[in-house]
């Protein structure tokens, strides 16, 4: 619970700081000097995405907080560590890098590279999801189910929640890809790609935290033991 309270306090501080910069710091009654550039207006889509990410982060933190409380009980029994998790992490990291490369191509107005970047990031993300499903299959075949014990239940819970967020990102990726292939307004395509880039970096950051919880046996926090599957 302490982890959740600390995170929520930091989140509240960040929101108040952002509101201060966006509202109290602004002085609309003061006229701009002649010829001065008008401050850019934040994109509503980007603001909505950041609000969603804050809500999603709160959800993940609550799950991690409940995990940390359950971890201290005597019947906690870690499950074997699936070796495929490391490869899946590499797939997601590659997808995040591809998204960053795609944004740079969009800023240059290079439509062909935008299409290539979106294809690469999408294929790597699909490979990540497929790899996670293979991990689930390996665990089931080894006799580990959601109802087996608390550690196994948290493993499936963390990977399932993160996987659902990845699938949601693939929906946005599909829309951005469709827009890139159809052509049209480059500004809207660039905005869609930038939103995907932010979301993919977020997915990678969350997964790195969850992966650490899954395999950090040396820190005494692991859901998985040092034995590999």
Image (cartoon, rainbow, N blue to C red):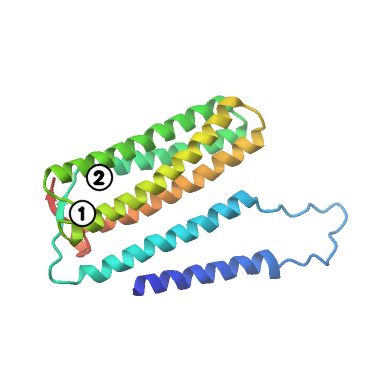
Q: Residue furthest front?
A: 147
Question: 113 above or below 103?
Answer: above
- How far from the left and from the top, in percent, is residue 148? 15, 56
Which mark sits nearer the N-terminus, 2 or 1? 2
Name the spot of residue 53 as percent of width and height, x first: 49, 56
Label annotation for residue 85: 2
- Count residues near mark 2 (Cα–Cα under 10 Å), then give few for <14, some for 14-19, many for 20+: some
Which x, y percent locates residue 138? 17, 42
**How far from the left and from the top, in percent, is residue 44?**
64, 52
Observer-nearest of 15 and 182: 182
> Disc 2 on helix, strand or loop?
helix
The N terminus - image quarter: bottom left
Tell me which corner region of the image, top left, top right, bottom left or bottom right, holds residue 183: top right
The answer to whether residue 100 is visible is: no
Query: Residue tagged by mark 1?
Result: 146
Which mark is drawn over residue 49? none
Q: Is residue 220 left or right of residue 59?
A: left
**Quarter in which the C terminus is drawn:** top left
Please rate how many residues cluster around mark 1, counting C-alpha atoms within 10 Å: few if below 14, some from 14 to 19, many from 20.
some
Q: Is residue 157 above or below residue 104?
A: below
Residue in view at x 40 percent, y 74 percent: 5
73 or 196, which lies in front?
A: 73
- Image position of 180 (left or right of 29): left
- The answer to whether residue 22 is visible is yes
Direction from residue 193 to residue 128 in the image, left or right: left
| Residue shown at 73% from the left, 66% from the top | 26
Q: Residue at x 13, y 47 (%)?
A: 228
Per the model, the C-alpha gap separating discs 2 and 1 is 18 Å
């Amino acid at each position: 619970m302490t982890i959740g309270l600390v995170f929520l306090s930091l989140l509240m501080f960040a929101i108040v700081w952002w509101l201060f910069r966006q509202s109290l710091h602004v002085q609309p009654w003061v006229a701009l000097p002649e010829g001065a550039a008008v401050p850019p207006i934040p994109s509503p889509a980007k603001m909505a995405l950041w609000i969603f990410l804050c809500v999603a982060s709160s959800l993940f933190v609550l799950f991690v907080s409940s995990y940390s409380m359950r971890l201290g009980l005597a019947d906690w029994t870690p499950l074997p560590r699936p070796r495929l998790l490391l490869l899946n992490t590499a797939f997601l990291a590659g997808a995040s890098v591809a998204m960053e490369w795609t944004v740079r191509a969009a800023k240059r107005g290079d439509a062909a590279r935008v299409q290539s970047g979106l294809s690469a990031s999408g294929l790597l993300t699909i490979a990540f999801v497929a790899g996670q499903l293979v991990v689930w299959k390996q665990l089931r075949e080894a006799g580990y189910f959601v109802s087996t014990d608390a550690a196994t239940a948290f493993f499936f819970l963390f990977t399932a929640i993160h996987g659902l967020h990845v699938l949601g990102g693939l929906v946005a990726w599909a829309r951005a890809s469709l827009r890139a292939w159809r052509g049209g307004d480059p500004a809207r395509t660039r905005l869609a790609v930038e939103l995907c880039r932010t979301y993919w970096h977020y997915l990678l950051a969350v997964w790195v935290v969850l992966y650490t919880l899954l395999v950090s046996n040396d820190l005494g926090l692991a859901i998985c033991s040092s034995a590999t599957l």
